[in-house]
Image (cartoon, coloured by chain):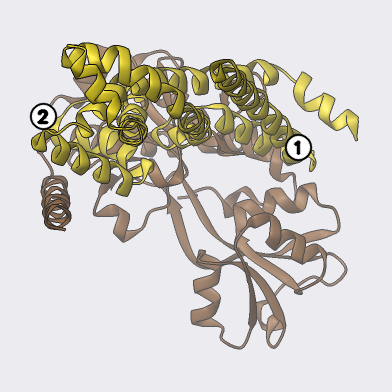
Amino acid sequence: MLDSAIEIFTAGRNTARLFEGLAITLKISAAAVGLSILLGIPAGLLMSSKKRFWRVSLKLYLEFIRIMPILVLLFLFYYSLSSVFNINLPAVTVSILVFTLWGTAEMADLVRGAVTSLPRHQWESGRALGLSELQLNLFVIVPQAVRRLLPGVINLTTRMIKTTPFVFFINIPDLVKVAQQIVEVTGIRNPLASVWVYGVIFFIYFAICYPISLFSRFLEKAWQN
Amino acid sequence: MKGTFRFIWLVLALTLAIGWSVGTHRALAAGELAKIKAADHIRIAVFSDKPPFGYVDENGVNKGYDVYLAHRLAEDLLGDPNKVKFVLVEAASRISTLEADKADIVLANFTYTTERAQQVDFAKPYMKVALGVASPQSAPITDVAQLAGKKLIVNKGTTADSYFTKNHPEIELIKYDQNTEAFNALRDGRGVALAHDNTLLFAWVRENTGFVTGIDFLGDQDTINPAVKKGNTELLEWLNQEVDKLTAEKFFYSNYEETLRPIYGEAVDENSVLITE
């Protein structure tokens, strides 16, 4: 039993290839999560502001992204953009772009939720102290909203990491695709290949996502005081 | 509510706009071959997980029947078999890959169909595929007539499914979604035989002793062809000449020896897979 596993992971560069796939997965999700947080916070503040134009257009954007399956967005930006407008973006750029579009929409909605849940007197007291809108947001609203945001952001991050395997539809060999390649090639003579390889993939995803949720629990505790 | 309606209209308009522009193919500029030569590499789309046609071996190197041909095309066009960049595709993304100009040629076991031929241009075939029927060695099925009133295992939505539904209603079909399920059903004896693409069966019976491909050629013969972007006539014509030349010099036989024989073994006649004339 164990021999078959050892055979798979020691053959050629199999293990190295899995880690190369993992590097791609991590690169895309880290870039997308980072950009989504950066863009999502101002977007969320605008969504909860009184400005009608921003509220409506951001709401439309959010609904648009929510309805569109990620796969359709990937196809749209990778294939359609190129065949219709002749804009030929590299696959990794496209995936970071698409995941950021999605993440920003979700993030903005989380921020909006967190901000509107704050009691009104936070704004009123801030204004009474003579803070400008920017100062009010920066020093009063955002720090309080961030704590309420945390569970949602962690959830979004892990969801993004788990959605990245879609990128193999735009020809990027990510972790899951590399696993599939190994399974299909060794599977002919080693029927246990899929169990071993996908088992390892399971633990890799767990090893990435679990620390993230541990970190969030730690922050939640630390911020309680 | 009003916002929602406006939004739906926006999506509809956008879909129509994109659909329309995709439908009207832009004419390709001449000099596609010159463009490939200027780039000094050719981009060929192949599978990365479909042995023995296109796969990545344990060292991360592309291998297989399609890949072997791809290297030869690069050699003949650019003078070096390694001047090829492989684009690793899925079955579902082969047409888009060409339309979006992400690859020059698709060599991903692309079966010719009239529907596909409206979207891409197929060159001359380099392989053929038909149905086969695998059965236990102890009770081999060598003729379709033997199957009357018995249970035959097929995969839902495949050529085998539609062929037997249409031509042999007297045979009872048991249908499965996944290859693995279907093959396990044959092992468990839930049907007397299993019908699938013959190329797949050849590889399977070799690894699973006790089974034979009693019928190795059945139904409509389909061909596997190289494909290029619609309207890329210059590359298409070059490919046609190239396939003729390679067929004449029996290149595909050496390709078979190199990539398929080790998988199929001696039991299979190469002429059931290769284009002979």
Which chain hosts label 2? B
Mark 1: few, some, or many residues within 10 Å (few <14, many ≥20)?
many
Answer with left or right where residue B94 lies relative to residue A76: right
Q: Name the residue rendered at 73%, 35% in the picture.
A: A199
Report x, y in % for residue A116. 30, 35
Which chain hosts label 1? A
Q: Nearer the viewer, residue B79 or A42?
A: A42
Report x, y in % for residue B247. 44, 39
Q: Which residue is mark 1?
A: A193
Q: Is residue B77 visible?
A: no
Above or below, B96 against B149 in this view is above
Q: Nearer the viewer, residue B12 or A196?
A: B12
Circle 1 SS class: helix
Q: Nearer the viewer, residue A15 or A225?
A: A225
Disc 1 + disc 2, Cβ < 8 Å: no
Amino acid type assigned to the residue bearing label 1 in the image:
Ala
The chain drawn in brown is: B
Q: Name the residue rendered at 75%, 46% in the picture.
A: B266
Q: Is residue B78 visible?
A: yes
Report x, y in % for residue A184. 65, 38
Judge depth for marks 1 and 2 and give the one in front: 1
Image quadrant holding the N terminus of chain B, namely: bottom left
Circle 2 SS class: loop
Above or below, B213 against A216 in this view is below
Rendered shade, chain A: yellow
Q: Which residue is mark 2?
A: B29
